[in-house]
Image (cartoon, grey):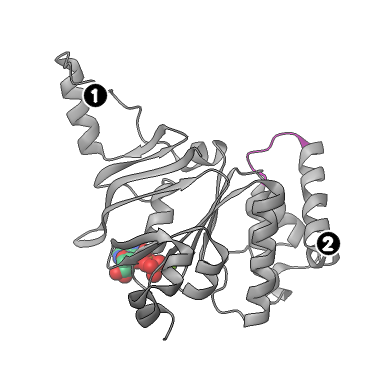
Amino acid sequence: MSELLTIDSISVSYGSIQALRGVSMHVNEGDVVCLIGANGAGKSTLLKAIMGLEPLVSGSISYRGEVIAHSAVEKSKRGLFSSKGSADGSQMHKPSLRTDEIASLGLSLVPEGRRVFADMTVEENLDMGAFLVKDDARIARKKQEMYDFFPILGARRKQKTRSLSGGEQQMMAIARALMSSPRLLLLDEPGLGLAPLIIQDIFEKIHIINKEENVTVFLVEQNARIALKASIDGYVMENGVIVLADKSANLLVDEKVRAAYLGQ
Ligand SMILES: Nc1ncnc2c1ncn2[C@@H]1O[C@H](COP(=O)(O)OP(=O)(O)O)[C@@H](O)[C@H]1O
Ligand SMILES: [Mg+2]
């Protein structure tokens, strides 16, 4: 199984707050992988770092074996080595990629809290998701695919997004992220603030996107039970550090996970 995403010992800070400290993890192609952790653990920061929205203080992130983000410090160290003709095999990396460059490689983020454009229609929101797609016929085809997959969006395509329910807005945020035909979908708490039955609907869709559309999924959730049930591998983050990594099935029966995250 090939590694699609590799996070190698990354740290991210907001001023004096160290949000991520030496985080390493990987996502294999074709899998659903989850990261669980309490509010403030650093989950969203990790997704932002993957999309190039937060700079790394140290470490690197690779997609399909190619470095997409690294810390400026490491870059200059490598530059120094290579300018001296070091024989340690270290390579000069290209600069960290911009968010649009990362998106064009096949990564797409559904941000926390959905971040829909409330005053735009459903259709206009989907158009925004296709900003990297230049071919109008392809955009039209993609939109139709989304309306077929999420019939409620088809029925409401001309309505302002603010008139949709929370669950419908989440579906729309996912559809918008799928407009660019990603290979890796990053989901930031898709179940946040939604009723259990709606969360179930959304996770069924995520399952189909993974199994039938072959999209690899990296899922971040506070809702540990549903995230662990929906994934093959799982990571647990506390205060910016990965404290557990295992098969999700093992984490579901882990004493510490049960006590801290599953209320048992
Ligand atoms: N833009 C920001 N500026 C300063 N601190 C931030 C910012 N975003 C997040 N943080 C802090 O970083 C830590 C991790 O936040 P976050 O990644 O949002 O966690 P999670 O998504 O797991 O709830 C928290 O302590 C949070 O307060
Ligand atoms: Mg978050």
Which residue is pictured at 18% across the width and 21% down the height?
88
What main secondary structure does the magenta stretch of the protein show?
loop
Q: Which residue lies furthest to the right in this view?
A: 155
Which of 61 and 120 lies nearest the eye of the viewer? Answer: 61
In this picture, is 24 found above or below 153? above
Query: What's the residue type where badge 2 is placed?
Result: Gly
- Report if residue 223 is visible in the image: no
Question: In this rendering, would 146 be left or right of 89?
Answer: right
The image position of residue 221, as x and y in percent, is: 48, 68
Amino acid on which disc 1 is placed: Ser
**Depicted 75 relative to depicted 237: above or below:** above
Q: Mark 2 points at which residue?
A: 154
Tell which residue pokes out farthest to the top in this image.
Answer: 85
Residue at position x 81%, y 57% in the image: 147
Q: Name the residue under label 1.
A: 90
On whether residue 260 falls in the magenta region, the answer is no
Confirm if mark 1 falls within 8 A of ligand 1.
no
Magenta-drawn segment: 130-136
Q: Residue 208 occupies which quadrant of the picture?
A: bottom right
- The spot of residue 19 in percent (x, y) is 28, 61
Q: Where residue 105 sits: x, y (%)?
A: 54, 36
Q: Give 47 or 262, whichever is nearer the viewer.
A: 262
For disc 2, the neighbor class at 10 Å (few under 14, some 14 to 19, many from 20) is some
- Dot 1 falls on a residue whose secondary structure is loop
Quadrant (top left/top right/bottom left/bottom right) for the C terminus? bottom left
In the image, residue 16 sits, relative to residue 78, either above or below, namely: below
Q: Can residue 147 be seen in this view?
A: yes
